Amino acid sequence: MAKYSYAPVSVDESANNKPHGRARANDSHDEVVNERMPMAVGVCVLLAIVFVLSKGGSDMAPGPQYNETAKSEALRGSTVTVTTASSSSSSSSSSHYNPTKSVHTVDIRTQEDHGSFPKPPASTSTSHSGTFASDVAKNCEGLVDPNDLDMGAIRAAAFAKTPPHIIECSAASDGESQSACHLPAETRYEALKQKGATLWMTGCSGAGKTTIATALEDKLVKLYGKHVYRLDGDNLRTGLNRDLGFSQADREESVRRAGEIATLFADSGTITLVGLISPYRADRDAVRARHEAQGIPFYEVFLDVPVDELKKRDPKGQYARVESGELKHFTCIDDPYEEPLNPEITLKTHELTIDQSAELLFRRLQEDGMLEGAPQLNQPLPNPDGDLVVDLHVPASERASKFAEAETLPKVRITDMDLNWLQVIGEGWAAPLTGFMREGTLLQVLHFNSILVDSFDLTGNKGLHTSQTNFETFSDEQAPDRVSMSVPITLSLTEYTKNLIADSGKKDVTLVTQMGEPVAIMRDVEVYENRKEEIVSRMFGVIDPGHPYIAEIYKGGDYLIGGEIELLDRIRYNDGLDQWRKTATELMDEFKEKGADAVYAFQTRNPTHAGHAYLMKSAGENLKEKYGYKKPVLWLSPLGGWTKPDDVPLDVRIHQHEEVLKAGLTHPGGLDPDSTVMAIWPAPMVYAGPTEVQFHAKSRRSAGASYFVVGRDPAGMKGSELAVASPDDDLYNGDHGRYVLQMSPGLNGMKMLSFVKVMYDISDDTMKVPDASRMNDFISISGSKMRALARQGATPCPANNIPNDLLEANCVPKGFMVPDGWNIVIDYYQNIDSGNYVPWSQPLVEPKYDDAHTHYHGTFGKTDFKLTHKSYDSFWHDVPLYHNRYGDKKIINFIVEIPMYVSAKMEVSKEVKGNPIMQDVNKDGSPRYYTYGAPFFNYGLVPQTWEDPDVKSAAGNGGDNDPLDVIELGSEQLIMGSISACRVIGSLELIDEGETDFKILCIHEGDKDYDSIHDIKSLEAVKPGTIDRLVHWLKMYKTSDGKAVNSLASDEPYSVEYSLEIIEDCHRRWKDLCHGSGSLFDDEFWLDGAACRGRRQ
């Protein structure tokens, strides 16, 4: 609890050791009187001044309220010499004044010196008449003539005195907060969603101060809901400044008072608009200094208008009165106006409309962050949602320790699409999200397309999205801010992984890619039900089981896991495009380097033609002309994450865009590289129409974009043949996306720039908005026509002879697309089935292999990958079955095909020459992965073995026609292609689609528990629960691919002895296969390994 106390006593009181407000008990009465009398007299003088000020201005013509006798009565006492500006005799309606100075001696005495005060006259005089002077002579002998007062000097003397004591907060003790005494400005601003500032609008009468301030106030209050107040002569001189005239001293005081009020208003968080002529530079500088001393933004706005223009305007007829001689001492005419030397803003209002002037002021406030309560992070560009830059990369100094920690945590497998979403989160594209969504966050997204946030803990809800979802206890207050978040960003997992996490007893997990790479740690995880139908229904609003992203959701596990992310390293894809992948923070810096005062984003999923270029360039010009931006920068933002198979591949789009930038402004389809930044946006495409486009726009704000270019049917697609309402037709109305985007909650000032229809103008070979008066000059080139022309290899049309039927002529207008970019498009559509493209961002990683003894060709994870041994012709045939060094048949050679945690299904190919380790494939030819979870074991084969299909088990199941499989149950990841001595500890008999598939269980000699594990019993003693986990995995691992549950002949592993018999039997079958006496023909498998070939000789 904060403490309060009186402020320290004054220097004089401290010297006399007097307590504040009370004399010492042993002081005599006379001492106290003598000590306090000057203070008492001063207070009386000040009270008298207040009384005088309440009755009228010292230099204004006396009005009905002006009581000279009351002033005379009020001021008496000791003699003070002051300087005053004498008023001239005039009526209350006169605008003339006389600034002539005179010096007077004022005799202020006590009542005891003069007897009773004279009584005021019955009525009040309204002019400086002789009668009044006579009355003063009769009734005010020895008193003060108010006309002789120099109020400016009296104010100056008062200001020079020590200010009165005030109660203020004492220093808080350790652990206590000062906020109970004074609400911190940062907290106030964050709560108000704006910062306080003063715009001091100075200039001659008629320059437009009040008019422009009113227009600005109107915009800020009505359109943006900001707290704004306007101070000008109208509301100041009728109240606070009603006692002031137009002398220099009074003008100074008027400015000072307005400045003090503006300081208080701005300190309270109000945007304060002050419209005063304030002709004297020193006075304005004093107000500026007062603001600067308080740390309050101050903008001197100079309305710079030539006097001749002001005379033409003359809204109040004052310049005409000056010209006629009716008005004297008129500022800017016959009284001085000192122009600002270095104003923050200069408005030449004779060259600008009222709206343009107001817009310039608005934009300055916006750029400086005055319209946001949070600190401005990337001035003049907007803050990310939540007003915090999100960058979840682990610092380089901590990377080694984090990787070491990651090795000790349960492993959660993520797909390549999940990796895209991880990049979105970790690099700040989904700010303020800092992890995969917890259940509470997901519910907000599904029901509101937005989330509530409290980044600065104003209501105690800062941890709303980073703590476990609680359905029992709720905060008394809602989080204060709503930000857009329309797309669920979730991570699914299977029951196997769920149990793995629960059994570990740990709250944190490691995320590993399909290739077994640890990429992130997820903290304080929350596992909850994956309600797929609810997610699909609310996210898409359509029923279409054939929708590609909907299908991906239904393929996911039955659970979701949420928690905060720490990226262990930069996510790289090594596909030749990483130079175009930039984090939100890096992109902010690049925009800043280009001097951007606005950024507008244009998302692409297709090659860019001249129509797109026209829209992008015209949008930039519009931002300059309509909003006054000086350097708007275009963000060419190709989508880089997962896309459906028939979309244009990422590398094709990127390379085509590179040519567009190279062409610059030399071609209608080019873009200016000086005002354009290309950067891949990493999110997957989910094809959710109006719901998704909100996320597209919101996410671009994270890197500083203020505007998002949006066209017809954004994020839409045609329904599949399984769609209920729209089979093979648009799932969403083409106009709905743009409409919803304009109305979306929580977009926080993000503005939309809509597409317009453009066509090719054959008269000048450019694309533009068609001219209705000459429509015959315009032709339409649709996307489908462009694709057909590219497949045909269309060449440029003859100059000045563009045919009506482009497809028949097989030509493309020369201004349609940058020529080198068009060649890239042709190459793609003519070789679309080659498979030599990067469809979307998928990591290409080096395999973890035994480079001392093996080598590989092709790309790991693709079907062309082959790993072979340097010493053996064949892994299958030439590596010995037993590790002869030990002379123990319990020790076999184990060839690693799939290292621990790797999901890519790698296996020795029986058919290919050399029996290399290759990527297994699905029936459609795509690479096959384990999808049930990250394997907690190393997987491979026993060389020189074969499970013969003709050998039937008791249940009638034949062998699976493969070498014996091995599951190594140690604690370390082994590398692909390595050959390890492995002690057999048992086996399991898997029944897989009617085939017997034995799994030999072993522990390799390098494992830390090798000396302790000899059989299943000792395995369970050292690593309890291992067999239960393995049995569950073997039964369920295909179910995540939509297949049936596997079965085991027994959930209890076979003994070591029986397992060795299985190995020996399969070894004999392999010998028969090599000899040619097996059940299969020799030419079905590659059997020319030296050891196998020798058995036929």
Image: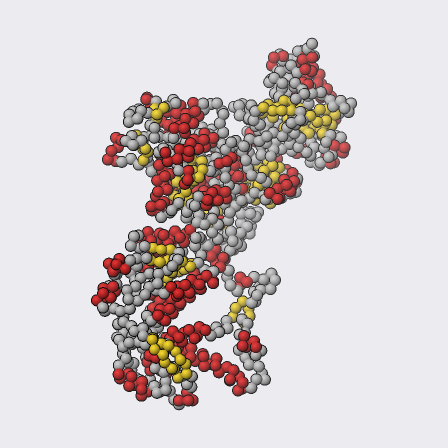
Q: Which quadrant of the rendered structure holds the N terminus? A: bottom right
- Asked whether 920 or 822 is in front, the reply is 822
Name the residue at 60% across, 43% down: 396
- Is 841 located above or below residue 702 in the figure? above
Q: Residue 65 vs residue 173: left or right?
A: left
Residue 988, x across and y down, in percent: 68, 27
Q: Which quadrant of the rendered structure holds the C terminus? A: top right
Residue 268, x across and y down, in percent: 45, 61
Instruction: Pick out the residue farthest to the right.
Output: 887
- Is 736 located above or below residue 1094 in the figure? below
Instruction: Pick out the residue farthest to the left.
Output: 324
Q: Residue 316 vs residue 142: left or right?
A: left
- Asked whether 194 or 80 is in front, the reply is 80
Name the residue at 35% across, 87% down: 141
Residue 453, x across and y down, in percent: 50, 50
Asked if residue 694 can be seen in this view, the reply is: no
Asked if residue 304 can be seen in this view, the reply is: yes
